[in-house]
Amino acid sequence: MAGETGLLSNEEDPAAAIKSIITAIVTDLRVALHRFDPIRVIEVARLACLPWAAEGTNSPMTPEAIVSGEGGFNRAELLALIVASDGDETLSDEGSQGAEESAGRATRSLSQVIGDALPKADRILKLASLLDIIGAEPEKPLAMLALMMRGSEMWIRNSSYPDMVADTVRQLFGKQEISQQLERDLGFDAAAAMDVLDACHELQVDRLNSRLWRLIDDFSAVSDDPAPADPEEMIQVWQSTWEPTAELITVTIDEICTATGLPASVVAAVLDHFTFEAVAWTPEQLVYEFTRGNNLLRTRPVLRSADGAAMLIHGAHIVTAVRESLEQHLKTTTVWEPYQRFRGDLLEARTKAAFRRILDSATTWDGFEYYVPANEAEERGKPSGFSKRVEGDHLIVQDDVAFIVEDKAVALTANSRTGDTRSFRRDLTGIITKASIQASRLQERIQRDGGLRIHREGWVDLSRIREIHTIAVSLDDLLFAHTATAELVKAGLLSSESIPWTVSIHDLDLITQLIDRPSEFLLYLRRRRDPEATVFYSAPDELDLFLYFYEAGLYVEPDPDLVKARMPFMPAPTTAERRRYETQAPAIITSRTEPLDRWHAAQVAINKSVRAGTTRPEDSDGISDSGGETEAAPPKPRMSPSPLGQLVDTVESRRDYGWLSVGATLLAGSFEFQEKMAKIPSLLLSEPSSGRCERTAALPFGNSLEEGWLLVWCTRPPGRPPASFERQMRDYLRAKMHQLGLPRGASFAYDETTGQLIDVFFDDHVGELEPRLQARLDQLRAPGDFDRFEPAQRAAKKRTKR
């Protein structure tokens, strides 16, 4: 890219110069590839561009490998568009940089020509990106998001795992009235379309593997045979593998019928519907549309040979082609409205299931209606007088934490994918902005009124809610729009005061599968929704942010002086704290998903084996290869080990009130800080107080009073009655919280005899203390006087040394 910018630095009109260069390269590629069969060109480009099988598989290539990877998809597609649209047009070599100027060059093999063509395809893609950057107007709202969207369409094929999206597509179109409408109109339904296209893709991969195995077998036979091999025969075998004829590449209708069990009429209807046709499009026009985000292969991924046999460049477009193409057709039918309602119902059910996976003990309201004030007069009154009834999608309450979730099943239009700002704004408003507004409305009522008046249920007391997280879940994968929160705020689509976590249902599903502790999920939301984090961290994919959270915390250093000003009782800022704050810089999180890719691929293989009856569900810790042996499955990505992990697990297993927020708070500290906290119980237990007095250690935690916590460790001496001990510790916790002005606190009680955790006391009292506790304030240590958490003898040695 740097070389291109230098080349164009002296141009009066760089954009025009770039377009001219792209046109010349396209012409050059047309001349170079024109004499070859387009099907053969595409296959050789596939072999050069597409990813090979992951390590550990027993085939050179797997269908999943050609779907899940990103390497070279756009290059192969670009060449396919150029050769598939060329027809029988006669090309002149005049003015072409790549014209074959000699008979010697004219005899070059297809592989050699493709080898020269791929760098040129790369250059087109890079020049197109540069052209987009030159034309961007970053000061305008949505300009950067539109730029990201177009770039994503050009460079990224699958932002979610294809098998997950395929399951969603099958569910979307599985309703009887929808599938029957498609069968009447098109001759097939979505399930048949998926089966046909999947079979075409898998048969192509099988053919490639057959050629590769034949090559391996033939060369092995030659090496074992003392007789000299026939060079021409070996060259023919080599060429038939890497430069096969169209018959060795494409798949016939009869073959697909055999693989799927579908009648020929259905298979033919599917292939005809999804076949790419370049009528009225020149190669230059197709390349231009491709580079601005309008990839015609997205909804028409099938290419046909002269005899009608079919091929796919890859399988990555199958699910998007089926869904978008069939949805476009349904818009012209009477079932479009029922289909849209079903989209919403499916998303609501999937969201509910995802949250139930990690918060199985929470109180939930799904698809509910509640009352809000209809005017200012009602706003000034009591909730019992509210008369406007509105809808909420999900309210999930776990003790002191509420999750407000809004589902948006609106789909991005084709114009939005090209970065058309008008369409893009309209679609993002329907998906993200409306969800944020609706979630914020519910949050406001909980915070102002201390509860909700829910239709047909009455008043629900939510006055103990101390933490609320708003979430917008979309059915579509919005690529950068999910993770570029700062740009959404800049464009006015979100308010900086109320930033929801925007996530696709596929990422939400996967994240809730990865979560080992519910407190990890709550901590991720705290970090992910932090306004500072939305500026400091950006990534092309939500899963990259989540896995970076697992790896490094997704943490933004607070201003230590500001923390001290907000919480005067905290220690004075250190030089190291100031340095960390001043030296941190915004970071772009690159791909972190390789371990997740391996784990997910293993899960897909296990699920296939379970469905086929060759593996039991409980055998999911191993993968059976072709030899029947079982090897260890790739490990699931997990959060970096925590020194407080055992305590968090114990707290979560006890299910005391507040366990979720307590666990997330314990995990929130740095590794070093958690190590110090983990040592506190043993330090207290190592030097019990004489008599029947407990030992305590109090620690304030947080960056502000509003979100701060008081964490207390205490010991119960032998013979101390449990009831009086609990009352004493709860009183101390509440009084100390009040002294510091902190809204939440937790106390961890250990038995001095056994050394085991025996109780967890949670407190979220705000407001004035009752008189008996008010009198205890004078007995507490000064607000800034906290324990050093060191054994007395160690502290004494330090004093003596000094």
Image: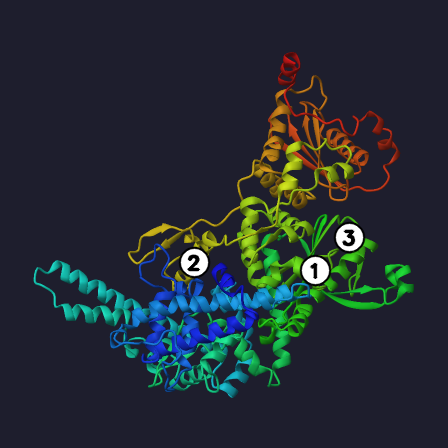
Q: Secondary structure at mark 2?
A: helix
Label 3 and label 1: CA atoms lie apart by 29 Å
What residue did someone put label 1 on?
A: 489
Residue to which mark 2 is pinned: 601
Q: Is residue 410 above or below residue 640?
A: below
Count of numbered circles in the view: 3
| Image position, residue 287 (x, y; %) | 48, 75
The percent position of residue 422, horizontal first and vertical second, equals 67, 74
Question: In the image shown, does 597 or 75 lie closer to the viewer?
Answer: 75
Tell me what residue is drawn at x 43 percent, y 77 percent: 81
Q: Nearer the viewer, residue 308 or 180?
A: 308
Q: Quadrant of residue 711?
A: top right
Q: To which residue does mark 3 refer?
A: 462
Q: Is residue 668 visible in this depiction of the protein? A: no
Q: At label 1, which amino acid type do we have? A: Val
Residue farthest left in this picture = 227
Which circle's residue, 3 or 1, is located before the other in the chain?
A: 3
Q: Looking at the image, do the residues carrying marks 3 and 1 touch, with CB atoms under 8 Å apart?
A: no
Amino acid at dot 2: Ala
Q: Residue at x 67, y 53 (%)?
A: 529
Q: Is residue 587 above or below residue 505?
A: above
- Count neighbours of disc 2 (C-alpha within 10 A) and say few if under 14, some if 14 to 19, many if 20 or more: many
Q: CA distance from mark 1 to mark 2?
A: 36 Å
